Image (cartoon, helix red, strand yellow):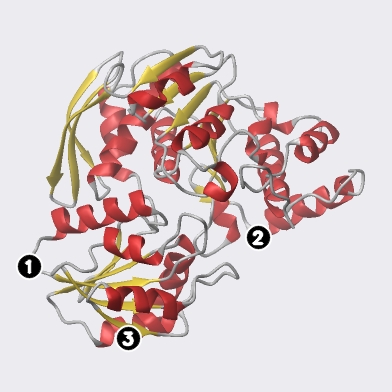
Amino acid sequence: MVASVAEGRAVPPDLSNVQALMELLDHPERSAPVIHVTGTNGKTSTARVIGSLLAAKGLRVGTFTSPHLELINERISADGRPISDADLLEVLSSLASYCTMLDSRPRWFELITAAAFMWFADRPVDVVVLEVGMGGRWDATNVADASVAVITNVGLDHIEFLGPTREDIAREKVGIVKPESILILGESDPELRAVFEEPPSAGVWLDGRDFGISRNELAVGGRSLDLRTPGADYEGVWLDLHGSHQGRNFACALAAVEAFFGAAVDDKLVREAAATVSSPGRMEIVWKEPLVVLDGAKNLEGAEAASQAVAEEFGSTRSVVLVVGMLGGAAKDPTAMLSALGVGTPAVRLVVTCPAPSPRSVPEALIADAARRLGCGAIETPGVAEALEAALADSGENDLILVTGSLYVVGAARSALAALS
């Protein structure tokens, strides 16, 4: 159980456990240079793009992301391939003996983070792309000292730990910046600028000032981008991801890789990485008739981005059927989330609700009641698979089913759809 502090925020874990574990393991987090990524939204996609750009340069890349969609192995990968069951078992079994030497029992995320560092050190990899689990300052990944730190954006999420204000959240996220880090900052709110420029660093590259995207347009199957970094301009780059927000994520990733190398990335390699990158569960098309799109939007900013992407990329001729499950949290109001997803507008004709496969799930009845209050029809179902079946049964070729609200729901939907195909 977590204690509470005066301002009402829950007390997060500190780094003492994972720091002690790293010392016992002879510091595997120092075995390769690190690019560290945080942000309220877009950090997994940004981490995947960074990995693709580094791989295009010929480096062996270890990537740690969270959460996973279907299998825990997805969190830890090298050269784009998840850790095998055998390797994961071996590294976790090895960790078990060290955990007995700690003063307190490690948390689950601390263990999987330590497992990633061990596996990367053993392979070994040339560079690690490390995604924060939550926040930054006290996150288990922050035992690593990054040469490049990326903050994609700041929104109101996990405010019971990080909030209650955007400035509070920004201060938590900027905790990944170390004196030797170059900060790549995708958040452009001038009111937060001082927070990001306060800690000692090797420099701050600001979106719109030092790097950016001058054209971000819909193209067949993705986006067409014109990009600028301190070292080069890139015109007409085709990105194999959906949503204008993915263009912004790509710009942050490209700046991060240039900062890492201290030189511009070859134009051909940028185009190769943009055309081959994937980000499962983020505006991912998984079914064609009817069109089924998965997006793990889990907060208001993510829901708004998903709604905008659907409207822009898939046209106004389709009616949207939402399959929604959500986790609870201080900033997770079902009515606000559904409004951000377009419920209450003519674009959305039906909401199918389900519990997220997590003990922290919002009851499906509460989400359905919120949809009805917004003037939209709603169906309650007991699980993600049942919600998909109900949505597919009610949809025709002119409909689009958007599965959203939580990456836990999206992961379960991917598994359910694979069983149906």
Q: Position of residue 341 (x, y in %)?
A: 27, 61
**CA neighbours of label 3 inside 10 A, class few (<14), some (14 to 19), many (20+):** some
Residue 416 in the figure: left or right of residue 103: left
Q: Secondary structure at mark 3?
A: helix
Which residue sits at x=85%, y=35%? 24
- N-terminal of the pair, mark 3 or mark 1, is 1
Observer-nearest of 253 and 155 = 155
Hey, what amino acid is under mark 2? Asp
Q: Which residue is mark 2?
A: 85
Hey, what amino acid is under mark 3? Ala
Tag on residue 390?
3
- N-terminal of the pair, mark 2 or mark 3, is 2
Cα–Cα span, label 3 and label 1: 22 Å
**CA neighbours of label 2 inside 10 A, class few (<14), some (14 to 19), many (20+):** few
Cα–Cα span, label 2 and label 1: 45 Å
Residue 23 in the figure: left or right of residue 175: right
Observer-nearest of 53 and 292 = 292
**CA neighbours of label 1 inside 10 A, class few (<14), some (14 to 19), many (20+):** few
Tag on residue 317?
1
Which residue sits at x=66%, y=44%? 116
Which residue sits at x=30%, y=81%? 378
Q: Position of residue 71 (x, y in %)?
A: 56, 63
Q: Position of residue 6 (x, y in %)?
A: 66, 42
